[in-house]
Amino acid sequence: MSTFLHSSNPPLSEIKATNSRLTAGNAPRNAVFVGATSGIGKATLTRLVAQQTPIKIYVIGRNAAKQQNFLDQLRGSNSQADIVFLEGEVSLMAEVRRVCDEIKGRESSLDALFLSTGYIPWGGREETSEGIELFSALAYYGRLLFVLHLLPLLKASTHNPRIVNLGGAGLETSKLLLDDIDLQKPANWSIGNLAAQIATAMSLTLSRLAEENPNVVFVFANPGLVVTNIYNQGYGGKWYMKAFVGIMKPAMKIVALSEADAGERCLYLLTSAWSGRDALTMMKTKSGALFSITYKFETVQWEGVMTESQRKDAGNKFWSRMQEVLRPYL
């Protein structure tokens, strides 16, 4: 039986206690982690493996040699864990397709997909070799390509399959630039516009996929402020931006959630060790729609800006653009 999120904010102590009760009966039997070689994804993966349940995990990253110590630690912490590292540059859609094809060639079902690739374009707009803006490739198009390729495996699971996508849930806006979805015009491009545009696009697109695949739980979660190495990259030649963020980081750390605690929260979302009593999806249902979780760890329903976005037919426009971009890689 699927279980769902509480609509109120559970204390961290409750989350940790619930996670500690994970067993082979309610933990995922296999999972794919994209973005787990650092930051929140790494903390979540570490916490899941430490629970000592039998599990096979595919970890997607760019360089296996650089991650060898981490992989050895994971394997050493749980003799029942089968950790498979697959090398891939997930900002490139062709690489995402190749990695997914390898997973599909090995597995007939999948219990969990965790997506947390992170990047902040402090240095301005940058495009991949495939012509996709880098932040959009990592935070939106690449993640959706993983979802679309691996959905058949998730649908084949009988073990409460779910997708957890970390991002800007709660940052959605009705002030959308639907005539320039990828913000290619210089006047439209900014970190703020990009974050709001992609948060809205992701909510609308995942909502559609959740409705079409009611047996898979879709979670779009905002982890809140967590000071990870995401703040150490993406500056390009803008040294002054790096200096400014460096000055702000000590103050940020005072109010930020630690990586370990963020990992506990994310494990809570990813697993079914907890029972859902009163949580509702964005459509105010118990299932068959997207669960959107704010940085306060509260669920969001379809109100305000999202209703206005629907009125503008934004969902269909984002969907059409997503299909156009990803079609060569499906």
Image: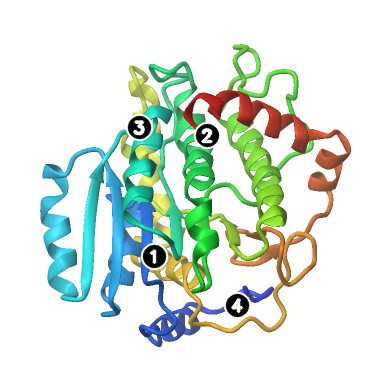
**Quarter of the view holding residue 155:** bottom right
Task: Identify the residue position indicated by label 1 in the image.
Answer: 263
**Which mark sits nearer the N-terminus, 1 or 4?**
4
> Horizontal and vertical percent for residue 218?
60, 59
Residue matched to label 2: 141
Q: CA distance from mark 3 to mark 1?
A: 27 Å
Secondary element at tag 1: helix
Q: How is the image coloured?
A: rainbow
The secondary element bearing badge 4 is classed as loop
Q: Position of residue 253 (x, y in %)?
A: 39, 55
**Spatial CA span between label 4 and label 2:** 28 Å
Q: CA distance from mark 3 to mark 2?
A: 12 Å
- Secondary structure type for disc 3: helix
Q: Amino acid at mark 2?
A: Tyr
Give the image location of residue 201, x and y in percent.
66, 38
The residue under label 3 is 95
Picture coordinates of residue 21, whole percent (x, y): 40, 87
Instruction: Depth check: give the residue in front, 196 or 133.
Output: 133
Amino acid tagged 3: Glu
Image quadrant where residue 305 sits:
top right
Secondary structure beneath dot 2 equals helix
Which residue appears at 11% of the width and 55% of the height? 69
Q: Is residue 44 above or below residue 167?
A: below
Q: Earlier in the sequence, mark 4 or mark 2?
A: 4
| Cα–Cα gap, marks 1 and 4 | 19 Å
| Picture layout, residue 38 above or below residue 219 | above
Q: Residues within 10 Å of mark 1 (few under 14, many from 20)?
A: many
Q: Nearer the viewer, residue 30 or 15?
A: 30
Q: Which residue is mark 4?
A: 3
